[in-house]
Each structure stands twice: as structure tokens, then as C-alpha cells.
Image (spheres, rainbow, N blue to C red):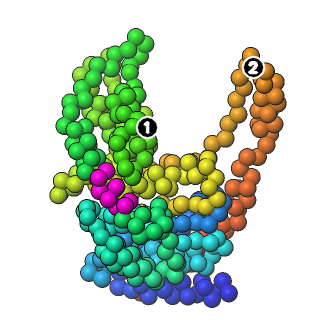
């Protein structure tokens, strides 16, 4: 059975890459293999998997007929879904969020039930070749979805104005401290209220993203004192700061990125153990990098000395040190990794054959 699947996928790869340049074939391979690797990493978590599509993927399928590069992206994604249907044993769906639909429909207000229904039918048609069913994340009815879209539009207006204020502000700051220097990210967090008046987006995740943007501005504007040079917080903050820009029309890009982060945050999913897995799917490098940084597992134990439970806590911590908290995750990883390698080998062979042709 798998042999037939491999033969079919290999033939599909060769067929869809005929006439493509070596550079395009390499790009195709990197996209398809990259999505498969991310799937395999998320496979370590337990439960049905939902491949949450961002607008970059929707747009690739939408414009694939007229845009050769978009078509190459769409073809690579379809090839990746062959890994899901042919090599994985996990129940898996494509998934669309209200924010992705909002961007697909032009980021406007006053969207009606009829318009939403038409957009949902469009999405079904775009992805029919993947062989995966589409599920919806974040709403249970048409009325609820229309309400979510209205809430996103309100947040869009608010965050665009709020972001403009942040960008226009002079962030020159005296970073001297009694010992060392003040940390720009700490200053940034204090500048943003915890209770931003948002209707759809999570205030915590919005603050998480915007604080990194402010941190970058503080670092840029506070180079005046050689004895108090600003210190950045690292690569994740840099990646977060890249998520939001103003596009040529003056709209704030990256709303869908914030949505993707708050829904597909791997660290939060590990902690919450919801019984299903939400896997972010994007062609956007910055968003992909953020999602990669946010996919980590952490377990810890502590001791409160001087309390009645301290002795038991010490025992629990010692037991934890010799336990294997990630044993089940490792077991699932051991199952999927050879299948990932097999799939990557199949598409690599197809790509090599297409190059020779």
C-alpha cells in the first residue's frame, strides 16, 4: 500500500515540476519538506491535528492560476498533504480561523451572512486537491462567525491607530540604572496596558508582540549614552518585532500573524493539553520563525522551604529529576521520524528526476 502511495507521489512531483527551473524546484522541495518537518514536530503532541491556514497559504491557492510563484507554493503544499494522508496515522484536518477569513475577504466591516457563506465555499474549492477536510476554528455557527468578523474589524481599527501612535513616538530613553542598565523590553512591557480594549484578539498576545516592537524602537533611539548601551532580549523578540508593518495602503499587516500565534502557540498547547493540536501553516518566514521559537516543552518542580509541605516537595522534585516527563512525546517522535525521512526521500527523488529532465 505505501509502495503504491510513494510511486504516485513521486510521479506527481515530477509532473508538477516539469519545465520549472532548478531554483524553483529547490524552493518547492524546501517548502514541502519544511511543512512535513513541522508536522512531525507537532505530532509529538497528542490528539487530532488541525493545520491552521494563514492568509499567505489561502492567497497562494487563490491566485495559483495566474501567478507562477503562487502556483509553485500551492503545489508544494498539496505535496505536503500527501505526507499527511499517506504516511501519518493521525486524524488531520485543514483549519481556517475567523481572522484568516477576515483577511481573505478584504479586511472590511459589515460582512453579511451571504458573503461569509460564499467565502467559505471558495475555500472548500481551493483546497479540494489536498484530500483533507476543512474544519473551522473559533466559531460554531454562521451568526457567531459574523460576530467574530465584526469584532476583528473593530480590533483592526483600534490596533492600527494604536500602532501608529507607537511608531510616531520618540523612544529615546535614559537607560542608566544604579547597577548596570535598564532593560528595554521591561520598559516596553510597562508602556502597554494589560487590559487593551480588544474584542477578538488576546490582549496578552498583542502585548507580547507589540512590546518587542517597542523594545526595538527603544534600542534604536537610545544609543546616545556609551555607558548605558541598550541590551536586546534575543532572537524571539527580533522575530516578533518583524511581524507588524504598515502596508502600501496604510493598513497594519500582521493581524493574522497575531491570531496564528495566539491559536497555535506550541508552548501553550503543551501546557494546556487540550487533547488536539493546532499547527500553524504559513509561507511567511517571520511568522514561521516565531512559531518555531514558541514550540517548546517545559516541566519544573520547586520547593518552598519553611512551609509544611517542603519535605514532600523535596521528594517530589527528586522523583521528577529521575522521571521521564517527555517519554510519550519521544515515543510519538520515534514513530513519525522514519516516515518523515521516507517521505522527504520520495520527493527528493522526484525533484532530482525533474532537474534531469
Assign a secondary structure to mark 1.
Answer: loop
Q: Is residue 61 visible?
A: no
Give the dominant element type of the magenta stretch: helix, strand or loop.
Answer: helix
Q: Give the magenta range.
A: 147-156
Circle 1 residue:
234
Q: CA distance from mark 2 to mark 1?
A: 37 Å
Residue 354 included in the magenta stretch of the image: no
**Is residue 9 among the parts visible in the rendering?**
yes
Which comes before the other along the chain, label 2 or label 1?
1
Q: Is residue 314 left or right of residue 179?
A: right
- Judging depth in this view, the residue of 127 and 178 nearest the camera is 127
Q: On the image, numbered disc 2 is attached to which residue? A: 307
| Mark 2 residue element | loop
Left or right of 256, for residue 344:
right
Q: Is residue 137 above or below residue 179?
A: below
Where's residue 131, x and y in %? Answer: 52, 82
Amino acid at each position: 500500500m505505501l509502495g503504491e502511495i510513494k510511486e504516485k507521489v513521486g510521479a506527481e512531483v515530477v509532473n508538477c515540476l516539469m519545465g520549472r527551473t532548478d531554483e524553483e524546484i529547490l524552493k518547492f522541495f524546501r517548502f514541502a519538506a519544511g511543512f512535513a518537518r513541522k508536522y512531525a514536530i507537532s505530532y509529538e503532541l497528542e490528539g487530532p491535528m488541525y493545520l491552521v491556514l494563514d492568509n499567505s497559504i489561502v492567497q497562494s491557492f487563490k491566485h495559483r492560476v495566474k501567478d507562477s510563484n503562487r502556483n509553485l507554493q500551492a503545489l508544494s503544499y498539496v505535496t505536503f498533504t500527501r505526507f499527511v494522508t499517506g504516511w501519518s496515522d493521525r486524524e488531520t484536518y485543514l483549519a481556517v480561523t475567523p481572522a484568516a477569513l477576515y483577511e481573505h475577504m478584504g479586511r472590511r466591516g459589515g460582512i453579511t451572512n451571504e458573503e461569509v457563506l460564499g467565502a467559505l465555499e471558495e475555500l472548500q474549492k481551493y483546497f479540494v486537491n489536498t484530500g483533507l477536510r476543512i474544519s473551522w476554528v473559533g466559531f460554531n455557527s454562521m451568526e457567531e462567525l459574523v460576530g467574530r468578523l465584526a469584532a476583528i474589524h473593530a480590533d483592526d481599527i483600534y490596533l492600527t491607530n494604536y500602532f501608529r501612535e507607537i511608531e510616531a513616538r520618540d523612544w529615546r530613553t535614559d537607560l542608566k540604572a544604579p547597577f548596570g542598565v535598564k532593560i528595554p523590553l521591561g520598559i516596553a512591557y510597562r508602556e502597554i496596558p494589560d487590559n487593551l480594549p480588544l474584542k477578538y484578539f488576546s490582549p496578552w498576545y498583542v502585548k507580547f508582540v507589540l512590546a518587542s516592537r517597542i523594545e526595538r524602537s527603544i534600542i534604536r533611539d537610545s544609543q546616545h549614552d556609551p555607558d548605558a548601551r541598550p541590551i536586546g532580549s534575543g532572537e524571539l523578540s527580533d522575530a516578533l518585532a518583524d511581524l507588524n508593518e504598515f502596508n502600501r495602503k496604510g493598513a497594519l499587516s500582521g493581524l493574522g500573524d497575531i491570531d496564528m500565534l495566539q491559536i497555535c502557540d506550541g508552548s501553550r498547547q503543551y501546557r494546556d493539553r487540550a487533547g488536539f493540536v493546532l499547527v500553524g501553516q504559513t509561507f511567511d518566514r517571520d511568522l514561521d520563525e516565531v512559531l518555531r521559537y514558541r514550540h517548546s516543552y517545559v516541566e519544573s518542580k520547586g520547593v518552598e522551604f519553611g512551609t509544611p509541605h517542603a519535605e514532600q516537595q523535596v521528594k517530589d522534585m527528586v522523583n521528577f529529576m529521575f522521571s521521564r516527563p517527555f517519554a510519550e512525546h519521544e515515543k510519538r517522535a520515534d514513530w513519525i521520524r522514519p516516515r518523515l525521512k521516507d517521505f522527504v526521500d520520495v520527493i527528493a527523488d522526484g525533484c532530482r528526476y525533474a532537474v534531469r529532465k
